[in-house]
Image: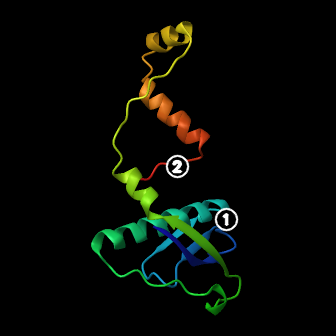
Amino acid sequence: MKYIYPAVFTPGEPDEGGFTVTFPDLPGCITEGDDLEEALHMAKDALGGHLYLMEEDGDEIPRSSQPDSIQLETGEFVSLIQANTDFIRERIQSKAVNKTVTLPKWLNDVAAEEGINFSQTLQDALKQKLEIKDFS
């Protein structure tokens, strides 16, 4: 299921930096990041994980608030964060599938000599290419 919730980004102390991210509609859903990029990534991860667990537990998922209805303190801002619990569920409950790949013999030989795990290397390369961070 796809969800969109407003997140409140609160800047850290000037000497510390970073952001704390909370979701007013989801008490207990909180995360932080050392910079805005990391805070956005962590917000999506936290929201997805929180909603996934709510679904698994059979909890009622609240409707999301309108961003302009959220009271903010000085320096705070609201950003909408999207999460897809179906995607998270697939990643958590994923099973391995076999793929046949073709590569030059010399590359296969060198990799085999080095003890390279072909499956793990392909997974790592695909995650990097698709900009997918591990769910952990």
Residue extending furthest toward the left: 57
**Residues at marks 2 and 1, CA–CA distance in whole angstroms:** 17 Å
As drawn, 57 above or below 130? below
Foreground: 60 or 12?
60
Q: Position of residue 115 (x, y in %)?
A: 42, 17
Q: Position of residue 134 (x, y in %)?
A: 47, 48
Q: Is residue 5 visible?
A: yes
Q: Position of residue 125 (x, y in %)?
A: 55, 34
Q: Which residue is drawn at the image coordinates 63% and 67% (left, top)?
A: 18
Q: Which mark is residue 133?
A: 2
Is 113 left or right of 38, judged from the image as shown? left
Circle 2 sits in a helix, a strand or a loop, which is it?
loop
Q: Which residue is drawn at the image coordinates 45% and 10% (left, top)?
A: 113
| Eye-nearest disc, 2 or 1 | 2
Amino acid type for the residue under numbered disc 2: Lys
Circle 1 sits in a helix, a strand or a loop, which is it?
helix
Q: Which residue is drawn at the image coordinates 53% and 41% (left, top)?
A: 127
* Residue underneath mark 1: 36
Q: Is residue 12 visible?
A: no
Amino acid type for the residue under numbered disc 1: Leu
Is 95 left or right of 6, judged from the image as shown? left
Q: Residues within 10 Å of mark 1 (few under 14, many from 20)?
A: some
Q: Which residue is drawn at the image coordinates 56% and 11% (left, top)?
A: 104
